[in-house]
Amino acid sequence: MAHDDHEADAAEFSVSRSQRKRDARAREALGEALAQLPPARRAGLPLPEDLQKALRDLDRFPERGAHKRQLKYVGRLMREMEDQHFDAIAQALAQQRQGERQATAAFHALERWRDRLLDEGAPAVEAWCDRYPQTDRAQLEALLVRAREADRRTPPDPAPRRQLFRELRGWMAGTPLGETGRE
């Protein structure tokens, strides 16, 4: 038993003091990142109960002394957390952020398609319909006419552009016309 304690101490001292500080700062930074997330996004992460409670309490405090003290407490919980819990939280947060980046990229791609369709006209419609054959070409052309007319008004009406965007999103996702979630 004493031999096992000695091995654990030796393993702890094999990591430099600077590395331990960097690790502690990394854990505190993850705690701060968790604190900045909205509660709904934190709900999907594998957080221990004591950390969940500390983060809920942190949300209640205004940005003053109590908030700073609670944030330090969250940092302490993160530093004391077992490595496998820390790694699981870091990995889940990274996956969540990757999903957000992919959704943002898809959104921007769809915006570029919409703008291209409005700017280029028939060649862009042809390219869109080749790529997304489930598109109702007549509906798309009617939406483009409405959006162009709305853009020429003073002030421009954004509603037809939004409707075009929703329909494009539905066709891109393969959703049949009419199921794209009109608002």
Image (tube, rainbow, N blue to C red):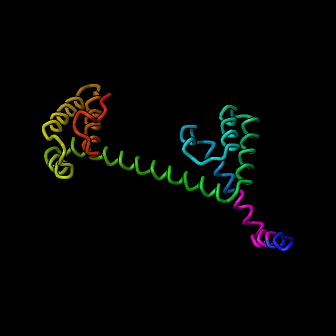
**Where is residue 70 drawn, in percent x and y?**
74, 40
**Where is residue 172 drawn, in percent x and y?**
27, 46
Quadrant in the rendering for residue 162: top left
User: Residue drawn at (21%, 49%), measured in percent from left and top?
Assistant: 132
77 horizontally vs 37: left or right: right
Quadrant in the rendering for residue 20: bottom right
Q: Nearer the viewer, residue 156 or 53?
A: 53
Instruction: Tell me which secondary structure the magenta stretch mostly adopts.
Output: helix
User: Residue drawn at (16%, 46%), measured in percent from left and top?
Assistant: 125
Return the residue found at the far right: 2
User: Residue drawn at (35%, 48%), measured in percent from left and top?
Assistant: 106
Return the residue found at the far top: 154
124 horizontally vs 45: left or right: left
User: Residue drawn at (61%, 45%), measured in percent from left and top?
Assistant: 34
Return the residue found at the far front: 1
72 horizontally vs 109: left or right: right
Compared to 79, does 149 lie above or below? Answer: above
Q: Nearer the viewer, residue 6 or 140?
A: 6
Compared to 32, does 5 lie above or below? Answer: below
**Where is residue 9 drawn, in percent x and y?**
82, 69
**Where is residue 93 drawn, in percent x and y?**
55, 51
- Provide the residue span drawn in magenta: 8-24
